[in-house]
Image (spheres, helix red, strand yellow):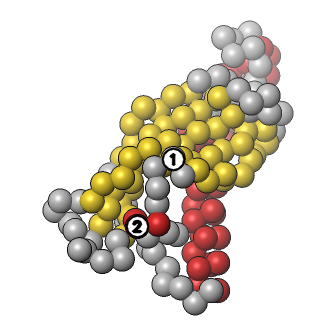
Amino acid sequence: MRFFEDLEIGQRRELGSFTFSAELIRKFATEFDPQRFHLDEEAGRNSLFGGLAASGWHVGSVCMKLLVADGQRQSAEAAARGEKVAVWGPSPGFRELRWIKPVLAGDTISFASAIETLRTSEKRPEWGIAQARNSGANQRGEPVFSLLATAFVPRRSAG
């Protein structure tokens, strides 16, 4: 992971992609969001979605998984170069969650994260606060998911 000083507004990270199969959609929905249009293909076709639709929480969870994996990759690369690894703090939350278009069985979603704002913490000068737009687009390039996430990012120095 990067230190606060390494971040720039507009900086974008491609996080990877994920294909939402009917089996995975039903598996997630059975455990976490058991609504009929996530569980049954016919019910999905007859719904506003027009097909078996992934839960928005499933889409968000996949984005989080890819975000964490990318951070782990960056940390491993920094450690291999002998650099100090930045350990990010917790997230105080997110805003502007949008499920823009349904994610249907067979869709492949590509996820990215782009820095929108950066500021130092007034109460904790050893930390910066970054806001990033995490987003997903389907195989046709259509936006399907977006949220504005906030995270505490360590600074190299408090001054």
Q: Which secondary structure, mark 1?
A: loop
Q: Which secondary structure, mark 2?
A: helix
Q: Depth check: give the residue in front, 51 or 30.
A: 51
Residue 60 in the figure: left or right of residue 20: left
Q: Which residue is mark 2?
A: 5
Q: CA distance from mark 2 to mark 1?
A: 14 Å
> In x, y percent, where is residue 114?
53, 47
Q: Residue at x 45, y 75 (%)?
A: 86
Residue farthest to the left?
123
Numbered label attached to residue 10: 1
Query: In this picture, is 133 found above or below 70?
Result: above
Numbered label attached to residue 70: none
Q: Depth check: give the residue in front, 78 or 62.
A: 78
> In x, y percent, where is residue 85?
49, 79
Residue 148 in the figure: left or right of residue 53: left
Let me know if residue 61 appears in the view: no
Q: Residue at x 74, y 9 (%)?
A: 46
Q: Residue at x 34, y 71 (%)?
A: 155
